[in-house]
Amino acid sequence: MAASSKYSDPEILARIGRLGLRARHAVQGTLAGINKSPALGQSVEFVDYREYAPGDDLKLLDWRVYARNNRYTIKLFEEESNLRATLLLDASNSMRYVGDRSAMSKYDYAATLVASLAHLMIDQRDAVGLMVFDEGQREWIAPSTKRMQLQRILDELEASEPERSTSIGSVLHRVADEIPRRGLVFLVSDLLCDLDELFDALGRLKHRAHEIVVFHLLDRDELELPFSGAVNFRDLEGSDEIMAEPRYFQSIYQDAMKTFTTEVRSRLSDFGADYLLLPTDDDLGAALSHYLNRRVRMASRGGRRAAPGGRARP
Amino acid sequence: MTFGASALLWALGLVSVPVIIHLLNRRRYRDVEWAPMKYLKLSIRTNRRKIRLEQLLLLLVRTLFVAGIVLAICRPRISQGGGLDWLAFRAKVSRLIVVDDSLSTGARSGDNSSFSIARNAALKLVEAMDTDDSLTVIVASNPSRPIATSAQVGDQEARGGIVDAVRALQPTHTGTLWGEVLEQAGRHLTRSPYPVREVTIITDLRAVGWTDEVQRTATRLSTADVRLRIVDVGLSPVGNIAIVGLEMVSPVALKGMPCEFVAEVRNDGTGAFGPIAAELTVGESQRTVRIPRIATGETLKIPFSVTFREDGVQAIGLELPDDVLPLDNTRWHAVDVRGHLNLILVDGDPSTEAFQSETDFLQVAFTVGDVPWRVYAITDSEWLGNSIPEADLTVLANVGGLRSEHVERVEQLVRKGMGLVLFPGDQTDAESWNELLWKNGSGLSPARVMGVLEEATAGLVVEFENASPLEMLTRITPEAMKRIAAEKTLELLVPSDEAVRVLARWDDVDRNPAVIERRFGRGRVLMFSTTCDRAWTDWPTEPTWLLSIRESGLRVADRGVPGLNLEAGQAIVVPVGSARSEDPEVLPPGSETPVPLMVRSDDGPRTLVHEATAVAGVYRVTWKDARNKTVTRQFAVNPATGESDLEALDPRRIDKLLGPMRPTITHHSDLDRLIEGEGREIWRTLMTIALVMLLVESFLMVHVGRQG
């Protein structure tokens, strides 16, 4: 039975599902040069077959299949896949925001993005795990390739509610401890936190050879400050209140946000991490498929190079 | 700074609207839960001062915009020569100057009169006027007709014409009703080309003529935002001696007979006046009339008589020596001197026996001695059959058989001035009398005949009435009056009518009326309640009969040509009817050149009219009749009596009458300051500033917050 959740958007899944294969090759290709799993064939779970290719370990030949079909196939086990993805979802209070032009809150958008990635990973038989965090780790689902993993992730997404403040730095340090083996780390957050702490923690992840992809979610209102008249701004993650007329400093604010996103992009680029700025009124399916397409093209050009971060184009 | 529409200054309170909106907007706010507070604070902190300045600038610009609009609407004016001259766009003004040329402005002090000061002030104002303004000049004696008008005073030729017209002004003998002057000024200004309107009245501010009508007109003009300035050219009130009346006392002026006049002289001086000799002019001859001593504040009546040697309309003039106001020191009176009076006695019951006819005793009364009467005694049938001739006096004695056409003719003649005396008799039928002569009070008869009282009554009591035809009888001894008796009298019902008065009553219990008078048109009717023969009374045999009949007859007889005596400003009107009247002309006093008369026939008979009578004196009117013979008639135009009173107008009354217009009152000695301080309007400048503020506001609204 297919996993279902309010965050499973069939349109998005249909759109990126076709890319899953490519993504997988691209992911595998991306991982070329990364150490293969040392745990191959031992106490691992059989997950699939594939046709024998010269050079494969003959120990993995499945003789029963040969007897039935006269075909040489080898078994694939869990650790056969090199891709272990960890999805880090920011569920702090700041993710609660939903602007007038957005159909959903940042959290809902993020959860849909995480669900889509989880679907993709599971469909590719890749291991995917989830950490939901705010000012600390809230929930941790270790990566697994099992079919049930997806439903667990989806259930967790639905059960979580944005609350408390954000402290990504400390969370990323925990993640580095939780996933000793290198893999993909997807960080889905608005990054409204201490950037130095963030990059310090990301540095640690990088040191452990993880590939980092940051999906930077912000509402269009948070980028443009479109309000007219007097507004009483109340801090979602604090007790501050500011009464102001945004009209008088709108351009200054937009510049400040542009500086913020540019800084994040730039510093992530230094890390070799992927960066995608996602305003929550953008079409997620289009944005995600555009991003995955780009990764496929980069992979087909050969070699791993830091995918240029930036906003996904529909 | 002054304001043309200061009543709108309250709207300046609207400058608080942008501030209130700004404050209300701050109270009306939206709550937003916000995540990127750090960047919000950074933005605000970075440009806190700039934000505040921009907000204040916007508020200031909006406030200035509102203030500019409101002030512009209030039509502010700044003084010329003040530091704000550069602000002024000059608004065109429609100006009207009223020059007071009434009699009182002839008052002198030294070499100057109020009028000469007024004329000079008007010239100064005209010279000082801005070239863009329009100007109309009127005089108080004739406010409906401007003496000069120009759409643009700047036009040299036009200005020259106005200056010449003002220089040619002379004082008049007229009185002024300032309510009418202000009304006419308002009418002229409604036709003026520019929205800013101003009236300048140059006047001596004497109390006479400033009636309550002024207040009503001023209220109306104030709502039309007409500015009012008054230039006071009055000299300090000084004593004035004036001839305030000159009337003929005698009922009729007859050639060769003394005609009595009375002159009224008033002393408003500071001390007693006289005795002096006043100069009396009668035709070409002159003599003096002694004016006795008149105490200060007194008005004395001085009688004198004149015997005219010629008949026709003649004028007499009485003149006092010059004083501070010489214009009221001469007065004229025009008199229609009659050669004789035509009297018709109509006998209703003729008889061939002596003193048996109705009119026998009347004939004796009217013909004894040296009398001016031409007496025609005719029978009633002759009178009725001859289309009822004109006469100065007609007496109907016991006339019966009147028909309505006869009565209509008699009514026509009495209306024109003929005197009528009615005596009853045995032929008097009450019903017929009331139907034809009483006509429910609208006919010739002064009273309704109720019947005949066949009760003996004795004694006549003369009522004390002003100018009574029986006035002479008041000097008769009571004993003589008691002898007047009657066996029969008419029972009369006298109406309550202003035109009717009882001149004498029978001394009986009921005090029945004996002699009654009625004014009917220009003529008068006397009605006796008893006969003029011995049928009902023996009065005709009494000595008092002669005096009564002669005096009363003289006093009700036709007085001659009417309308010969006028006040300055009143039109001379000569009704000529259908009679030929060619080349009508009038020679004004002091002039040697006659001017043509207007001929009018709008609503009735043809009349010759001359309206330009602002100067007092004798006007000689001539025209040619059907026989091409020149007819001459003199008219006496006299100074307006009220203007001799030089009492100054109380400032409190000025406030009451003109308060709504809030006039500026300037003494003529401060005229230069008035001219300098007139000021210029700056509403256009303010409107320009307001528009600029609007553009700046729009610019700021677009650019505020857009640039870092």
Image: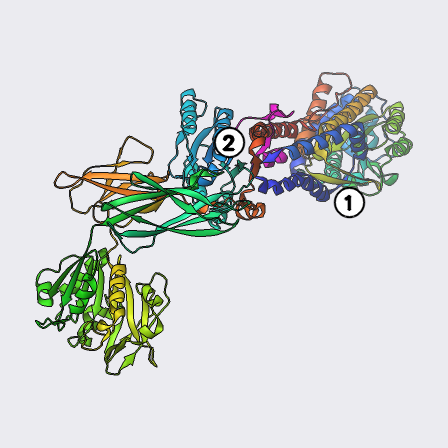
Toward the front, the furthest residue is B369
Q: Is residue A98 above or below residue B81?
A: below
The residue pinned by badge 1 equals: A155
Dividing the picture into quadrants, the one containing residue B60 is top right
Left or right: residue B269 versus residue B491 is right
Left or right: residue B636 versus residue A167 is left
Toward the bottom, the furthest residue is B455
Q: Quadrant of the C terminus of chain A?
A: top right
Residue B87 colored in magenta in the image: yes
Dividing the picture into quadrants, the one containing residue B504 is bottom left
* Amino acid, disc 1: Asp
Q: Is residue B584 visible?
A: yes
Residue at horizontal 55 percent and vertical 45 percent from the top: B270
Residue B232 coordinates in the image, percent (x, y)? 54, 37
Q: Is residue B309 above or below residue A80?
A: below
Q: Is residue B268 above or below residue B527?
A: above
**Within-10-Å neighbours for mark 1: few <14, some 14–19, many 20+:** some
Residue B517 coordinates in the image, percent (x, y)? 29, 66
Residue A152 coordinates in the image, percent (x, y)? 79, 43
Q: Is residue A26 above or below residue B232?
A: above
Find residue B121 and name its label.
none
- Residue range corresponding to the magenta coloring: B65-91
Say which of A219 and B375 sits in front: B375
